[in-house]
Amino acid sequence: MYQIQDLYDLKETIAADLFTGLTYPWEALPLIGAYICRLGETLDPSEYEKRGENIWIAKSAKVAPTAYINGPAIIGKNTEVRHCAFIRGNALVGEGCVVGNSTELKNVVLFNGVQVPHYNYVGDSILGYKSHMGAGSITSNVKSDKTLVTVNVNGQKIETGCKKFGAMLGDHVEVGCNSVLNPGTVIGRNTNVYPLSSVRGFVSPNSIYKKQGEVAEKR
């Protein structure tokens, strides 16, 4: 339930080819930057404008003049990048997304319709179609002891080989305000996370995450 096919509708991203030949979504993390550079050169210049080095922004996107975008980056059609957003690079933002005020992105793929609208940090993460992070919720992408990140699935630790790995959110995941998604968090589709949560490991799809050890199945 934590493979790419279980978490994401690949029709809802222009980055579908990024996942070709991969099994787990975190395997795409080291590939994002180079992929953006290749994909950007193929984008229709009637729909996308190249601004600076390896930065492509859809002409229908709204980007606040105070936002900072560093390449490689793609900002999709009809997406809104708000005041003082900080896009550090290796960021592929889909169509109809919201990147909010003071939100920071780094080495991420945001599928279409994703909202990170208020004071979010999203690093080394992949957010599925129409997933949403509440105000102040963040991904923590490095362990305090700097060891490689593992994904805990029902007590079994899955090695990822990643030193930096934030969160993999499936389609339609809702993360409550001021929650922390610890390194190696994977949340299945259609799951809701309570505000002020500290989340780690794998959370099943169609669930309500209340706190560690208390996860209810949606009815």
Image (cartoon, rainbow, N blue to C red):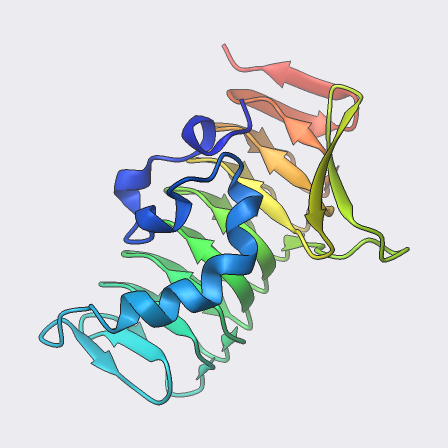
Q: In the shown orientation, is residue 213 left or right of residue 166? A: right
Q: Is residue 52 above or below residue 128?
A: below
Q: In the visual, does 18 lie left or right of 51?
A: right
Counting labels gives 0
Residue nearest the viewer, comparing 177 with 80: 80
Q: Hey, which residue is sitting farthest right in the picture? A: 145
Q: Answer whether residue 34 is visible to the viewer in this image.
A: yes
Residue at horizontal 35%, vertical 89%? 52
For residue 174, above or below residue 13: above
Residue positioned 66% across, 52% down in the render = 165
Q: Nearer the viewer, residue 181 or 155?
A: 155
Where residue 191 appears, as percent x and y from the top left, is 53, 28
Residue 119 point in image, percent of width and height: 59, 65
Q: Quadrant of residue 198?
A: top right
In the image as oriented, which residue stretches furthest toward the front? 21
Left of 159 or right of it: where is 45? left
Left or right of 62, for residue 161: right
Q: What residue is rendered at 56% in x and 67% in y?
A: 106
Quick one: 179 or 56, which is closer to the camera? 56
Seen as rendered, the residue at the extreme top is 219
Residue 181 in view, yes or no: no
Decide: is 22 above or below 5. Answer: below
Residue 88's spot in the image, x, y percent?
54, 76
On screen, 40 above or below 98?
below
The spot of residue 202 in percent (x, y) is: 66, 29
